[in-house]
């Protein structure tokens, strides 16, 4: 026997039972984004590897361990995007969409990271994200948080997520902090593993991303970035907190929240849940005021976030398993004898013209009469229409209501009105 070809580990197939959830959730997310006047951008899935190295940072988990990188046929090193911000900034600079402008974008699409697959963590996963350019904040930082809070309310999960907030200050503040961190790690070298020792001098903050539990315990003793914040960042942060207080958004300040990508500054935030086990971060974001310049554009303040759709949908499903169901067929057209296939086609199209919201499925008469009815039931059809040679020649149709069991003979010219009155 020929061996089956299987999907790649960590890359999922989604069938209609699941895509029904995805569609309803995505519709709500997009609707809220539109109400805040954010517009969609669609960007390539593949970018130059150097883009992610420069934007995310060479010494990060994503760039060091998680990227899907390959050599193009022309010798260029390319990477399947692990996140959306770098590509957005690249495109914005290239097309002149960022400098001196007020832009609010959103995107949705697959991202790729070579991680250990588990619940809520996959190698191909979907993110929806928003990016705002040209706004210093903190009002727009608050706007993004309010937008996400509105998502949770609309999806009915507002009681299952909490907001964690921090400021990681300016580049200069972080440079001061890193000195203190290096001094701390030097004193505790014997507790560090090889990976952390390597990161210690080049990017000490990335030691916080370690998964090693012994080192995690040590990190609780490490200096805290908050103690090194510059005055401007401090003011920005307290203004943000005040705006959130005014809006009635509760949050927890988490001085240890720094996020795993190098481009952030000042505001960072995460929405977390206790209901998904260890993959509890649903959505994360923050400011990245230096990134546009770092990638070759003119200095432009920016802030954004990204949310993992799989984790969101797991939570929505856990809270409300009936949040979405597959839409059933309204009318199933049973065709008795394949000689009238042509008439069946015509009738189906006429009904679709007359009743635009009708969900109609046609069986082209290749199955037995009994089997066609079984199929109608399986698709959850409300009504079965039967078309046979005798009905065609008499200009009639049989209509059976599968809910009431009523069956009637109708003139072809009456069918639209009759269906409309039943399905209304
Ligand atoms: P984590 O701490 O869980 O690894 P992260 O900090 O790497 O997350 P970000 O890069 O900030 O995540 O991405 C934003 C969101 O994208 C996460 O909060 C999560 O919902 C989702 N996400 C990230 N990586 C994955 C993955 N491998 N599979 C599924 N969703 C993911
Ligand atoms: Mg990660």
Image (tube, helix red, strand yellow):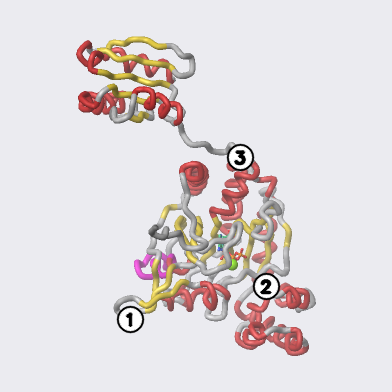
| Position above or below: 198 against 317 | below
Quadrant in which ligand 2 is drawn? bottom right
Where is residue 6 shown, x and y percent of the image? 45, 59
Where is residue 135 shown, x and y percent of the image? 52, 62
**Residue in the foreground of this view, choosing between 87 and 266:** 87
Disc 3/disc 1 C-alpha distance (Å): 48 Å
Mark 3 closeness class: few <14, some 14–19, many ≥20 residues within 10 Å: few
| Position above or below: 232 against 137 | below
Mark 2: secondary structure: loop
Q: Which numbered tag is attached to residue 75?
A: 1
Report the residue at 60% width, 44% height from top: 317
Where is residue 239 shown, x and y percent of the image? 67, 61
Q: Does the segment drawn in magenta span residue 76? A: no
Beta carbon of the mark 1 residue lies under 8 A of ligand 1: no
Residue that numbered label 2 is attached to: 211
Disc 2/disc 3 C-alpha distance (Å): 33 Å
Where is residue 403 shown, x and y percent of the image? 48, 18
Q: Does the segment drawn in magenta span residue 93? A: yes
Give the mark, 2 or 3, whose residue is nearer the N terminus.
Answer: 2
Q: Which numbered tag is attached to residue 165?
A: none
**Residue in the foreground of this view, choosing between 154 and 408:** 408
Task: Tell me which segment is drawn in magenta.
Answer: 88-99
Report the residue at 48% width, 14% height from top: 404
Residue that numbered label 3 is attached to: 321
Mark 1: secondary structure: loop
Mark 2 closeness class: few <14, some 14–19, many ≥20 residues within 10 Å: few
On the rendered structure, is 344 left or right of 154?
left
Report the residue at 39% width, 68% height from top: 46
Mark 1 closeness class: few <14, some 14–19, many ≥20 residues within 10 Å: few
Disc 2/disc 1 C-alpha distance (Å): 35 Å
């Amino acid at each position: 026997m020929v061996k089956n070809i299987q999907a790649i580990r960590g890359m999922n197939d989604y069938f209609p039972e699941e895509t029904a959830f995805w569609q309803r959730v995505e519709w709500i997310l997009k609707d809220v984004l539109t109400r805040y006047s954010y517009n969609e951008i669609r960007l390539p899935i593949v970018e130059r590897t150097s883009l992610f190295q420069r934007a995310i940072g060479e010494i990060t988990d994503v760039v060091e361990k998680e990227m899907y990188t390959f050599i193009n046929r022309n010798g260029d090193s390319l990477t399947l995007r692990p996140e959306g911000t770098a590509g957005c900034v690249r495109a914005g600079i290239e097309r002149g969409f960022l400098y001196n402008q007020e832009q609010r974008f959103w995107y949705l699409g697959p991202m790729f990271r070579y991680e250990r697959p588990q619940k809520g963590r996959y190698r191909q996963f979907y993110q929806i994200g928003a990016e705002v350019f040209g706004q210093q904040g903190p009002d727009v930082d608050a706007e993004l948080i309010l937008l996400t809070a509105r998502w949770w309310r609309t999806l009915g999960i507002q009681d299952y997520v909490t907001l964690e907030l921090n400021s990681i200050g300016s580049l200069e503040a972080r440079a001061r902090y890193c000195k203190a961190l290096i001094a701390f790690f030097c004193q505790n070298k014997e507790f560090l593993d090889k990976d952390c020792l390597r990161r210690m001098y080049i990017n000490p903050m990335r030691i916080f991303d370690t998964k090693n539990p012994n080192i995690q315990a040590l990190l609780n003793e490490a200096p805290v970035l908050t103690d090194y914040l510059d005055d401007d960042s401090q003011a920005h942060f307290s203004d943000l907190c005040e705006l959130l207080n005014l809006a009635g958004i509760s949050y927890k300040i988490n001085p240890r929240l720094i996020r795993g990508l190098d481009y952030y500054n000042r505001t960072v935030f995460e929405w977390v849940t206790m209901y998904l086990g260890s993959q509890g971060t649903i959505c994360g974001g923050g400011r990245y005021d230096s990134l546009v310049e770092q990638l070759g554009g003119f200095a432009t303040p920016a802030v954004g976030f990204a949310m993992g759709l799989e984790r969101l949908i797991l939570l929505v499903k856990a809270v409300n398993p009936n949040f979405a169901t597959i839409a059933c067929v309204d009318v199933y057209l049973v065709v008795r004898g394949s000689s009238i296939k042509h008439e069946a086609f015509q009738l189906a199209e006429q009904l679709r013209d007359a009743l635009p919201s009708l969900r109609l499925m046609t069986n082209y008469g290749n199955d037995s009469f009994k089997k066609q009815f079984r199929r109608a039931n399986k698709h959850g059809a409300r009504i079965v229409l039967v078309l046979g040679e005798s009905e065609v020649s008499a200009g009639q149709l049989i209509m059976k209501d599968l809910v009431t069991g009523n069956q009637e003979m109708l003139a072809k010219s009456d069918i639209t009105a009759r269906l409309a009155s039943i399905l209304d």
